[in-house]
Image (tube, rainbow, N blue to C red):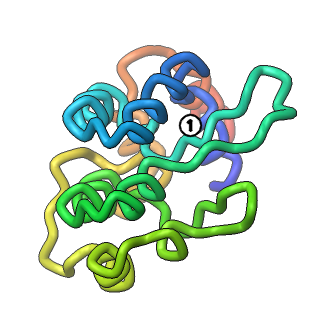
């Protein structure tokens, strides 16, 4: 299962350019653009792109920026609709809750409400409702490498 999750994430990684565009929008608190990009590509939610050499510092995630900005609705949207990770670290070891304004701190501590319904499907490897290879295959419409792997080994 860990290999499947890894392969699914690898097959859905946004381009570095798109990640930087997304993180720039979050850094500028351009929530309309952030949400628009997430609708198109939900896997952006936890990106912390570095430069191509991977030698630069990791960037703050969208949840870090939203928590810093004090935007409770955006923090809640990132948590409930896009399953943003509350455990991502900045280069200096800070989680979103560590940089959050007080009103956002409470939202992060509370996490998603138990009655929350997501508008976006979670990443396939996070889905608890998939129990068989047939159900996983149904998520893919092409001969994706994941389906081929599962067909051969499940």
User: Quadrant of the image for the N terminus?
Assistant: bottom right
The part of the image, by quadrant, that contains residue 105 is bottom left
Residue 24 in the image: state x and y as whole percent. 46, 31
User: Quadrant of the image for the C terminus?
Assistant: top right
For image coordinates 42% across by 34% down, the residue present is 137
The part of the image, by quadrant, that contains residue 112 is bottom left
Image check: 33 left or right of 96? left
Residue 31 in the image: state x and y as whole percent. 25, 40
Image check: 136 left or right of 11? left
For image coordinates 49% across by 62% down, the residue present is 85
The residue that mark 1 highlights is 8
Crowding around mark 1 (Cα neighbors within 10 Å: few <14, some 14 to 19, many 20+) is some
For image coordinates 50% across by 69% down, the residue present is 99
Look at the image and tell me whether residue 56 can be seen.
yes
Q: 78 or 114, which lies in front?
A: 78
Location of residue 109 with respect to 36 vertically, above or below: below
Q: Element type at marker 1?
A: helix
Q: 22 or 144, which lies in front?
A: 22
For image coordinates 65% across by 62% down, the residue present is 89
Q: 102 or 50, which lies in front?
A: 102
Residue 90 in the image: state x and y as whole percent. 66, 57
Look at the image and tell me whether residue 154 can be seen.
no
The image shows a total of numbered marks equal to 1
């Amino acid at each position: 299962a860990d290999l499947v999750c890894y392969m699914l994430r690898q097959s859905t990684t946004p381009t570095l350019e798109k990640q930087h565009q997304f993180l720039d929008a979050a850094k500028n608190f351009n929530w309309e653009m952030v949400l628009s990009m997430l609708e198109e590509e939900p896997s952006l939610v936890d990106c912390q792109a570095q430069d191509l050499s991977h030698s630069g510092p990791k960037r703050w995630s969208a949840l870090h920026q939203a928590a810093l900005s004090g935007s409770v609705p955006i923090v809640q949207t990132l948590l409930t609709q896009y399953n943003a990770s509350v455990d991502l670290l900045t280069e200096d070891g800070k989680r979103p809750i560590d940089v959050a304004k007080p009103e956002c701190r409470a939202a992060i501590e509370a996490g998603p409400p138990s009655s929350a319904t997501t508008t976006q499907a979670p990443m396939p490897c996070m889905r608890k409702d998939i129990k068989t290879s047939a159900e996983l295959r149904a998520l893919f419409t092409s001969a994706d490498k994941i389906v081929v792997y599962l067909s051969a080994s499940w």
